[in-house]
Image (cartoon, grey):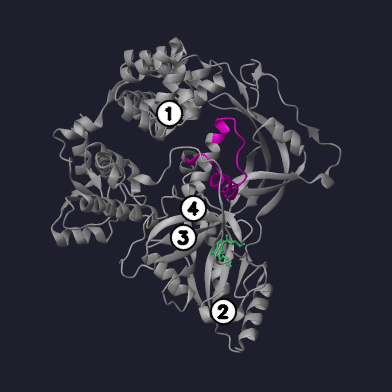
Amino acid sequence: MKRELERLRDLIRYHEHKYYVESEPEISDREFDRLMEQLKAREAQHPELVTPDSPTQRIFDGTLEGFKQVSHKVAMLSLDNSYNFTELAAFDERVRRSLGIDTDDIEYVAELKIDGVGIALLYENGVLVRGATRGNGTVGDDITPNVRTIMSIPLKLQGDDGLMPPSLEVRGEAFIGLKEFERINREREEAGQPVFANPRNSTAGALRTLDVMEVARRRLDVFIYTLSHAEGLAVETHSESLKLMGRFGLKVNLTTRVCRGLSQVKNYCDEWQEKRHSLDYATDGVVVKVNRLDYQQRLGQTSKHPRWAIAYKFPAEQATTKVLSIDVQVGRTGAVTPVATFEPVQLSGTTVKRASLHNFDEVRRKDVRVGDTVLLEKAGEIIPQVVNVIKSERTGEEMPFEAPTECPVCGSSLVKPEGEVVTRCVNSACPAVLKESIAHFASRAGFEIDGMGPALIDMLVDRGLAKNYADLFKLKKENLVELPRMAEKSADNLLAAIEKSKKVRFDRLIYALGIRHVGAFAARALAQRFGTMDELLSGKSASATGLLTSEQTALSEIDGIGEIVAASIVQYFSVPGNVDVIEELFDAGVEIIYPEKKAASASPFSGKRFVLTGTLNSMNREEAKERIESLGGQITSSVTEKTDCVIVGDKPGSKLDKARKLGVDVLSEDAFLEIIKADIG
Ligand code: IVH
């Protein structure tokens, strides 16, 4: 059993590495979850065999008391900065002078400077035993439980036991990817919490959090860039150590480049200054390091920085522009947000015309007025923010902003709950709230109603044709053709799209309801846990009769549902009108499909492995993946003997050749569509 468990763990570790380190998953998420379930079940039968490096042991579900302090064996220094090529050349000059090398061919390693938080990881016999912050460089915090939630950090290193150093310490940068950062801020904005100014702040905040589940929810990532201590390993250069760390299964950054001489370093800097916006993480410069470790030794360090490395900082991307107006928007949750419109200005590769000012307190604090000249910056390179007002540019003509006390759309009084920063319109019939809710309901991750765009939703709500979600399914052709710019053909198309959307997956239905804090992830967790709407409703209605707290507790025990989310679900279902609308949806013909059950029967996709190549016209990759998985198949990334079928879109790649070589079945997009249509019925 012990052996079998370890084999299963190794298999899961392998797939974790493929997914989180290499970003090249070989199996579907579902298949991965199945392996984890298997492991959990077996470990539950044999709790005495559970090891701390088991993939099931990543997240400690509880609150930490505080962090212990740890001393770093080797001090964690910071880097000296340079802001232009002259300063960089001075560094190169110093290095060569100290080493007594007068040719221009010192080997440097140029790597991106990740804008996150430095951490140190200690592995003993290949097992992660400690994660620590930099602290003051000598003493940091022991944040092991938080670091263990970072999926790209292996709990156990790969590689031969014989070669594994008994003690290995590496350093790297923990960060939050830009997409995740956007998600976190969106969720915080909706929850009435202050948004983070940039991904670095949210990473730093996460690493200091005592609630480990909360850290896990931030989905941190890491790049490892220093091998600080490796007992018994002989390495001569920094680039070699990076390779070695990669082989241990640690996530090193693949954009790193060995450069001969300063001119190649400059090329790298120029290149990434341009290209950095294409990355999913924030980088604020390049770190230039002398490659040879014996040179590093000879160069030594000052009390603060090594003399063998320097950071080249990209020029800060800021711009100034004029505020043309400050308007107030009402969101799906009723949150009222001030939004500034500017004279269009170029910033980090895009034209910025608008930026959220987040909330009224923020406008007051920054004292942003219409007519002001403001300094803009892109937080985490994506979201434009007003840094401050340039008060010296004021003429006296600027108009101070007055926060409204009434909803600009429906006129009802606005509410600002104690302790929250967000002001809300709490009128659930407010057209603005309704419009946003319908847009969410019909969106891709919800009912996916093609053609249900903002302009149409505006008209439907303004004319009283959509007073709730269920009304969408009661629309008639005669209502639609009366709308401006709605020809008969478009009305038919829209009705067909609405009809098609009536068959909906359970989790998508839950998501579409727009329950505060219930995104796609929580919706999937709820769908899995409750299975049917009746179960979910009966589970919840108990709460309305005074069981609220125990109900909440039960919900927050579901993986992926925290207490705030649980409270929000209970609150949603305690409003009778919300339950009525769900019933109305079913009366109007909405039908939940349960793809998993279907897949278990006769789907031609069941248990088969598929590979996609080329571009599909009818759907994107994600959708194709979802369809195949919902029918019981799985998507893998490369064609092997085990592949059952390759689905071929436009401009197929080498995967098609490989499929032909191996004699794997090939399916055109049309044939694929035929099959899935037949299967969904
Ligand atoms: S090397 C002594 N490499 O930048 C050398 N640091 O401002 C120290 N950082 O404390 C680290 N990306 O947290 C190195 N590729 C990279 C880095 C990097 C980001 C951080 C690190 C360091 C800070 C210095």
Q: Nearer the viewer, mark 4 or mark 2?
A: 2
Residue type at mark 4: give it.
Asp
Residue type at mark 2: give it.
Gln
Lower sequence index among marks 3 and 1: 3
**Viewer-closest of 294 and 509:** 294
Q: Nearer the viewer, mark 3 or mark 4?
A: 3
**Local crowd at mark 4 within 10 Å, few (<14), some, or many (≥20)?**
some
Assign a secondary structure to mark 3: strand
Residue beneath disc 2 = 297
Distance (Cα) linking label 3 and label 4? 27 Å
Lower sequence index among marks 2 and 1: 2
Residue beneath disc 4 = 280
Residue type at mark 3: give it.
Leu
Residue beneath disc 3 = 122
Lower sequence index among marks 3 and 2: 3
Lower sequence index among marks 3 and 4: 3
**Local crowd at mark 2 within 10 Å, few (<14), some, or many (≥20)?**
few
For the record, the magenta segment spans 188-212
Q: Is residue 178 visible?
A: yes
Distance (Cα) linking label 2 and label 1? 53 Å
The question of residue 486 being in magenta is answered with no
Residue beneath disc 1 = 556
Q: Residue at x 46, y 60 (%)?
A: 122
Q: Nearer the viewer, mark 1 or mark 4?
A: 1
